[in-house]
Image (cartoon, rainbow, N blue to C red):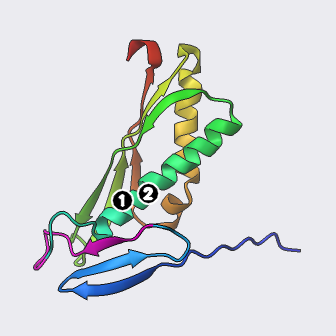
Amino acid sequence: MSNLIEHTYDVKLEWSEGKIGTLRSDDLDDSFEVATPPEFPGGIEGIWSPEHLFVASVSSCFMTTFTAIAEKSNLDFNKLSVPATGKLSNESGKFLITEVILRPTLVITEEAQKDKAHRILEKAEKFCLISSSINSKVILEPEVLIAESV
């Protein structure tokens, strides 16, 4: 007997004009514009691009995976921010996001929890389902700070 679990996530993208579309989901309240990034011909500044969304998917998946593991591990933390950078390159002859660098900063309450916090950050990167689903290299550069010293 299989324990297969499947979920679906539906989005709708409607072209608006030029290189701009509106992204929405019947499951969500908000919609937003997406466009070709300004680095490409006809690209538009100030609007989310597929490349931004790709990197945001890795970053947000890391955050949700971390919070789940931290909760199960009884790790108290005050703050988590997860800046991320995606590297787009055509080194293979076609454009690919070859790597995503995650630079999480975690603020914890107790110095004694620092090693545990690092292990949980590493585990979150390892078990993030988006990171596991992509070919891009994901690089983790974490920083753990103690609340009283911040």
Q: Which residues are magenta?
A: 30-42
Q: Which residue is mark 2?
A: 58
Badge 2: residue crowd in 10 Å (few <14, some 14–19, many ≥20): many
In the image, what residue occupies the spot 22% across and 78% down? 93
68 or 92: nearer the eye? 68
Numbered disc total: 2
35 or 94: nearer the eye? 35
Vertical arrangement, residue 131 with respect to residue 140, above or below: below
Which amino acid type is shown beneath numbered disc 1?
Val
In percent of width and height, residue 42 lies at 11, 79
Which residue ends up furthest to the right in the rendered image?
A: 1
Q: Which residue is mark 1?
A: 55
In percent of width and height, residue 138 lies at 41, 53
Do callouts 2 and 1 mark residues in contact (Cβ within 8 Å)? yes
**Seen in the image, is 116 located left or right of residue 33?**
right
**Seen in the image, is 54 located left or right of residue 146?**
left
In percent of width and height, residue 61 lies at 50, 55
Give the secondary structure at mark 1.
Answer: helix
Q: Quadrant of the C terminus?
A: top left
Which residue ends up furthest to the front in the rendered image?
A: 29
> Is 130 contained in the magenta span?
no
How many angstroms separate mark 2 from mark 1 (CA)? 5 Å
Badge 1: residue crowd in 10 Å (few <14, some 14–19, many ≥20): many
86 or 43: nearer the eye? 43
In the image, what residue occupies the spot 36% across and 59% down? 55
| Image quadrant assignment for residue 76 | top right
Question: What's the magenta bit mostly, secondary-structure-wise?
Answer: loop
In the image, what residue occupies the spot 50% across and 50% down? 62
